[in-house]
Amino acid sequence: MGGYSSEFDISIKSGNVVYKHIDRNLYQPFRVHITKNAWYYVDENDEKHNVDRNDFSLLLNGQKIKFNAAFNIVHGTPGEDGLLQAYFKLIGIPQTACDFYQAALTFNKRDCISTLKPYGIPTATNYFLNKGDEIKVDEILSKVGLPCFVKANKAGSSYGVSKVKLKEELIPAIEIAYKEDDEIIIESFLSGTEVSVGVITYKGEDLVLPLTEIVSENEFFDYEAKYLGKSQEITPARISEEDEKKVKDLALKIYKILKMKGFSRSEYIFHNGEPYFVEMNTNPGFTEASILPQQAAAVGISIQDLITNSIEEALNGL
């Protein structure tokens, strides 16, 4: 839990939920915090013990402890962008998230959209910028129109995201996004119902969970809406059976195209009656109030069930 990004605190909350709900009849859990300066185990007395990064082991009371598996609930870098996945692959420790390539690809919104487009996956019209590029305001707006969204390309929890309604708001929005990442994606506005779709690997099968409808009190599903109660998250979503089938089929298709495994939560907006893919999270929030656990609970899968299933699949190499 933890990580190197703005999502550090959210990841700590998610990690503590895993620690609270894990089945101690089956597993002995250790809370390992990943920070830029150190990796350490936090014991029951909140004392810190450094982790040996050579083999991801601990030295406690003179005894070396090696782990059977890592429950990776680090949001953002390095747990959601492929770095931790590759590290664990190299040292031979199973981990619960998707593989490193899938993590890196989905974390990069621009690359993910570009990969899915040849498969006919509908997305917003977009414009890409890298830090240092000339900002051609008229060219950008002629392509994406107003209103539009400016997003940091590699960031989660809606950090670095702005809705731009007026031409003069574009440059300040780009500056906000550059605080999170040196790459930006600018997207056309999609008007319609927004739904969040959890797809997970459960008992060896790809499972699409009940849909959650997102109704934000703010301009869009931003940080406040996600974490500070400024939204309604309605499960199951209030859409027709036909629309439900459309978006579930699309979410499952994307999960399979990308050769995903483990948890995923992707966002879609119904625009002109069709679901448009927005983005995918491969280490989505995992607090009791988070969307994925809510969706699982709607079909009788508890948080403990989700945790046990993830660990067993990691151990079995699924």
Image (cartoon, rainbow, N blue to C red):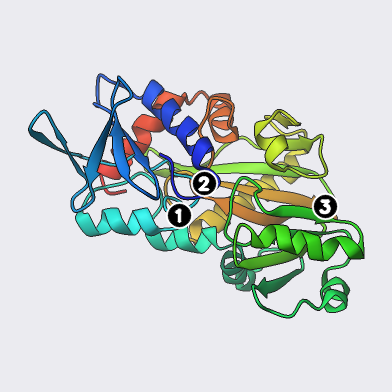
Helix, strand or loop at mark 3: loop
Front position in the image: 200 or 154? 154
The residue under label 2 is which amino acid type?
A: Ser
For disc 3, the neighbor class at 10 Å (few under 14, some 14 to 19, many from 20) is: few
For disc 1, the neighbor class at 10 Å (few under 14, some 14 to 19, many from 20) is: many
Which of disc 1 and disc 3 is earlier in sequence?
Answer: 1
Q: Is residue 248 visible?
A: yes
Q: Could you tell me which residue is drawn at 29 percent across and 26 percent down?
A: 47
Circle 2 residue: 264
Question: Is there CB contact under 8 Å for labels 2 and 1?
Answer: yes
Front position in the image: 141 or 97? 141
Q: Nearer the viewer, mark 3 or mark 2?
A: 2
Q: Could you tell me which residue is drawn at 62 percent across and 43 percent down?
A: 197
- C-alpha span from label 2 to label 1: 8 Å
Circle 3 residue: 273
Q: Could you tell me which residue is drawn at 68 percent across and 45 percent down?
A: 245
Question: Farthest residue toward the left?
Answer: 62
Q: Could you tell me which residue is drawn at 20 percent across and 40 percent down?
A: 68
Position of 282 relative to 62 (above/below): below
In the rendered structure, find residue 260 and report the number of the disc placed on it.
1
